[in-house]
Image (spheres, coloured by chain):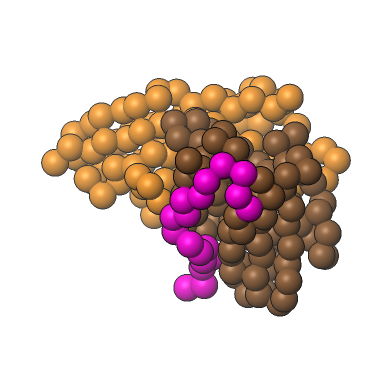
Amino acid sequence: EPEVTQTPSHQVTQMGQEVILRCVPISNHLYFYWYRQILGQKVEFLVSFYNNEISEKSEIFDDQFSVERPDGSNFTLKIRSTKLEDSAMYFCASRLRLEQYFGPGTRLTVT
Amino acid sequence: KQEVTQIPAALSVPEGENLVLNCSFTDSAIYNLQWFRQDPGKGLTSLLLIQSSQREQTSGRLNASLDKSSGRSTLYIAASQPGDSATYLCAVRHGEGGSEKLVFGKGTKLTVNP
């Protein structure tokens, strides 16, 4: 069964560094998302992406964040200058119709 | 602003018991509602999706109901098994303005004891 994949599973970075989190959505899906979950808190929406542009973003998704679909298969989230409070599990999701399918997540630790 | 609440926060039951998890949301103008399962340190597995026009959906031992006007959904698990132990998340997608985002509850942590 097709699934969303994410790499790396765990990323450790120093404050102020740039990180790129990678996702491969399910191949025929058209809508792509990033969510995050800070330890012990709710899953929070960051951004949605459709037809090569951002369709919706949350207040969290400020100028430090960007997304890209560089080719027909990958979907990336870039954080330009990481802060301690960016430490979280980042989930990529995709959908074709109604249901959003989530990847296993990338645990980002900012030290 | 949509708020999703799940009660109880944690539940421990003996194997074989039937159980109900609750989800409530403050804005009834939803497009659909999804139930997920999350295992520790892992991703979210979609269990059931109910559209706003539907009353319930079933998959195996799982049954989800939706009462949109009262802002409530329940997830019923029949004949629980230790393998059902996980955190169950409820998420709603808003119905107006073409919003894409899911708004999540904090989840109910279920432990099924052998």
Work out which residue is located at the far left of the displayed protein and give it: B114
Describe residue A15's horizontal placement relative to residue A109 as left or right: right
Residue A12 within the magenta-colored segment of the rendering:
yes
Q: Is residue A8 visible?
A: yes
Q: Quadrant of residue A31?
A: bottom right
The one nearer the camera, B3 or A64, is A64
Query: Which residue does the image show at 66% across and 65% down from the upper left?
Result: A75
In the displayed structure, A20 sits above or below B86; it is: below
The magenta-colored residue range is A1-18
User: Is A4 or A39 nearer to us in this picture?
Assistant: A39
Percent position of residue B79, x then y: 26, 43
Q: Is residue B73 visible?
A: no
Specify whether residue B6 is painted magenta.
no
Q: Residue furthest right?
A: B97
Instruction: Identify the colour of chain B in the image.
Output: orange
Magenta span: helix, strand or loop, mainly?
Answer: loop
The picture quadrant where one finds residue B1 is: top right
Identity of the residue drawn at 63% across and 53% down: A18
Count of picture labels: 0
Q: Is residue A11 left or right of residue B67?
A: left
- Residue B66: give x, y in percent of width and height: 58, 35
Relative to A107, does residue B107 appear above or below in the rendering? above
Check the image and report above or below for A103 versus B51. Answer: below
Q: Residue at x 60, y 38 (%)?
A: A83
Task: Determine the residue positioned at 51% across, 36% down.
Answer: A38
In-image side of B91 versus B7 (left or right): right
Which color was chain A given?
brown
* Residue A91 % position (x, y): 55, 51
Residue B87, position as x, y percentages in the image: 39, 39
